Image (tube, rainbow, N blue to C red):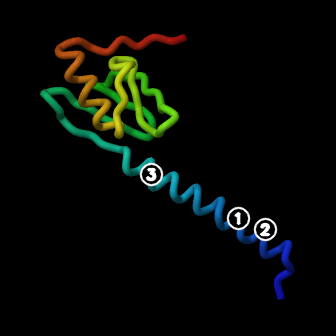
Amino acid sequence: MLSRRKLLMTGAAAVAGGAVVGWNALAAQTDFDEIYAGRRIHGKGELIFVDGDVVHVMRNGDGSYSTSINHYESFTSLRDAARRAVDTLGDLRPVTHVH
């Protein structure tokens, strides 16, 4: 027979495990690799690359994304953010800088 404490601990571990599985499933949905407007865009986790160059991504409080290229625009997905960055960059390469 399970004690109340053991039952609560088992439930907490199951919830924590479910959160990790849920987060991994969400991260897997954000992964993409495609050619858009003649440029290769690639997204993995919270990173975006345009022709192999990293584009800085920020996660907004509402779950949307913005990039260093389109800092004042919000996007519902990394793919949308990467596509808009390509539209804005044209033939230019993203500038990578460190704070």
Q: Are marks 1 and 2 in contact (CB under 8 Å)?
A: yes
Task: Give the class, few, some or many, for how many residues have Cα within 10 Å of label 2's Cα (few <14, many ≥20).
Answer: few
In this picture, residue 30 sits left or right of residue 39: right
Secondary structure under the numbered disc 3 in the rendered image: helix
Secondary structure under the numbered disc 1 in the rendered image: helix
Residue 90 position in % (x across, y down): 18, 16
- Residue, disc 1: 13
Task: Give the class, few, some or many, for how many residues have Cα within 10 Å of label 1's Cα (few <14, many ≥20).
Answer: few
Task: Give the class, few, some or many, for how many residues have Cα within 10 Å of label 3's Cα (few <14, many ≥20).
Answer: few
Residue 2 position in % (x across, y down): 82, 83
Residue 57 position in % (x across, y down): 43, 27
- Asked which quadrant contains residue 67, the reply is top left
Quadrant into which the C terminus falls = top right
Which residue type carries mark 1?
A: Ala
- Residue, disc 3: 26
Q: Earlier in the sequence, mark 1 or mark 3?
A: 1
Residue farthest left in this picture: 38
In this picture, residue 94 sits left or right of residue 13: left
Q: Are marks 3 and 2 in contact (CB under 8 Å)?
A: no
Secondary structure under the numbered disc 2 in the rendered image: helix
- Residue, disc 2: 9
Which residue sits at x=41%, y=50%?
28
